[in-house]
Amino acid sequence: GIGLKNASAFLALSDKVAKDLLSSGYKKKIYRSELPVYDCYKPDMLVKQTKKTFGYTDDDKVLLFFGYIRKYKGLDLLIDAMPDIIKEIPEIKLLIVGEFYDDPDFYTDRIKELGIFNYVKIINKYIPNEDVGGYYLASDLNILPYRSATQSGILNVSYGFLKPVLITNVGGLSEFVISGKTGIVIESNSIKAIVQGVKDFFIKNEKVNFSDNIKEYIKKNKFDKLPELFRQSIEDSIK
């Protein structure tokens, strides 16, 4: 494209993007950074309070799907996985939060067909910053069952709340998850993999302190070095 052709250098936020740039044939220097951890949401709530706000009990295990709903994000796969997840974990609940860019009826009709309406709560609206925290605090696991992606800010919001994620191995997503420590990585486009991944998480969650692992992991985030990278790129361009 015009932008790539006229760029003096590239800034890639994942190894996958850096490799794509290398293979594109544009012989420009590539600088590497990553998305920040979004820890700017500071709700004045306790986890137990937030669960009760949404009608959950302390014993409920809440899966969160957060963000705009589009086909590539794989929400339909997660919904189709729910009956088998419920069989394995009867106290499971699914909280879907975000604006629908697809027809909502496609999803709600499927939920009704599967007979899981009592296990699923949908909040179809834009979520302002001040309300984001409640949904994350109420959840146990944030699920990103994407069919395709490069990166996701949703993952970094989860890390901001020290919440583990279940993600698919598409694009650069899996670069930022240590499977079994900060989350669970599964294959994409697989209902079976989602079911197994959720089971694996709750088994591991009894022994693994995911929050502490995330806390250590995000200390290595490279975003804070971005000004240094910009300075370096400018200096390199005028040599």
Image (spheres, rainbow, N blue to C red):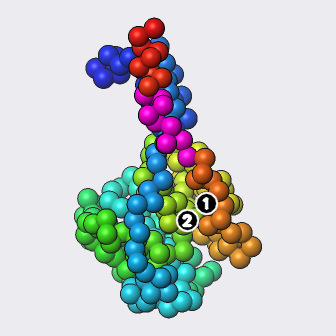
Label 2 or label 1, whichever comes before in sequence order: 2
Residue at (54%, 74%) from the top-left corner?
140
Residue at (68%, 69%) from the top-left corner?
209
Using a 10 Å C-alpha cutoff, classify the residue at mark 1 as few (fewer than 14 neighbours), some (14 to 19) or many (20 or more): some
Q: How far apart are marks 2 and 1 (CA)?
A: 6 Å
Side (left or right) of 126 relative to 74: left
Q: Residue 123 location in percent, x, y?
A: 31, 75
Amino acid type, label 2: Leu
Please check the rendered image and state whether residue 204 is part of the magenta-colored stretch, yes or no: no
The reply to whether dot 2 and dot 1 touch (C-beta < 8 Å) is: yes
Residue at (47%, 75%) from the top-left corner?
137
Side (left or right) of 98 relative to 234: left
Q: Examine the image and state in which quarter residue 198 appears.
A: bottom right
Using a 10 Å C-alpha cutoff, classify the residue at mark 2 as few (fewer than 14 neighbours), some (14 to 19) or many (20 or more): many
Amino acid type, label 1: Lys
Name the residue carrying label 2.
Answer: 162
Q: Residue 147 location in percent, x, y?
A: 46, 51
Range drawn in magenta: 221-230
What secondary structure do most residues of the magenta stretch adopt?
Answer: helix
Q: Which mark is residue 215?
A: 1
